[in-house]
Image (cartoon, helix red, strand yellow):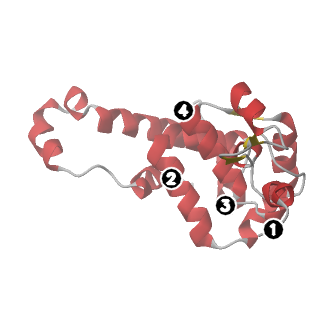
Amino acid sequence: YFKNNIKKDLSRRDFTLNSIAWNKKNGFFDPLSGIEDIKKKKINYCKKESIEDDPVRILRALRIALKHNFSLSESLKKQISKKKYLITQFPGERIRGEMKKGFEINAFEFSKSMMEIEIFENLFEAWKKTKECKANSVSKMNVEEHSLKTLENLEKIIACPKRYYPAWEEHFEKLDKPKWWMYLGALLHDIGK
C-alpha cells in the first residue's frame, strides 16, 4: 500500500493488534498501541471507519476474540452496532469464509457471540422472528434460545458420542469430523417456525 509511509499503511489494517510493524534495526513500530491492546486482551479498530469500510470485519473480530479469549472494546462494539446492517452489501463468500473459521473454532460460542451483537439477523433476515416465536407449545424457550441449545447439545454429542449413544460407538468412530455447515444447519433447523 504505502511503501513510503508505514504509519499510513498500518492505519488501514482491521484491528490494532494487526497494526504492529517490526524490523531488525528499529524493533517494533506500534503507532496505534496494538501491543497494549494485546496485553489487555482487547480488540479495537485502527480507525473509526474500519467497520464501515469492511463490515465482514465484524465476524473476524468475533472469531479472533473467540480464538484468543479476547473481548471487543466498547468503541468497537458501538461501531458494530451502528454499521452491522452494511454486512449484507459484501460478497457472500467472504462472509461464509469468516463464519466457517468461527464455527470451526467453537460453533456454539461463535453463534452465541453473533446473537449477542445481533449480527445473525442481518445475515439471515428470518432470524429476527426467532426471538418472538416459542420453540413449541410447552417450552419456555423462544426459537433462538432453542436453536442455540440444539447447537450446544450437538457439540457435546460430537465431542463424546459414546457417552450419549454407547450402542452406536463403532459407527461414530468411522465418521469424519463434522463440517462447519452441519453446525450452521443445526442452528437454522427451526428458522421457519
Distance between the Cα atoms at labels 3 and 2?
16 Å
Circle 1 is placed at which residue position?
Answer: 2
Residue 143 in view of the camera: no
Q: Is residue 12 left or right of residue 69?
A: right
Residue visible at 27% across and 31% down?
160
Q: Nearer the viewer, residue 76 or 42?
A: 42
Q: Give the residue number, with chain letter if any, for mark 3.
A: 123
- Lateral position of residue 111 relative to residue 14, left or right: left
Viewer-side label of 4, 3: 3
Tell us which disc is closer to us: 3 or 1: 1
The answer to whether the residues at label 2 and label 1 have Cβ atoms under 8 Å apart is no
Mark 2 or 1, closer to the camera: 1
- SS at mark 3 in the image: helix
Number of marks present in the image shown: 4
Closer mark to the observer between disc 4 and disc 1:
1
Relative depth, front residue between 64 and 193: 64
Image-quadrant location for residue 125? bottom right
Q: Earlier in the sequence, mark 2 or mark 1?
A: 1
Q: Quadrant of the N terminus?
A: bottom right
- Write down the residue under mark 4: 139
Task: Indicate the amino acid at tag 1.
Answer: Phe
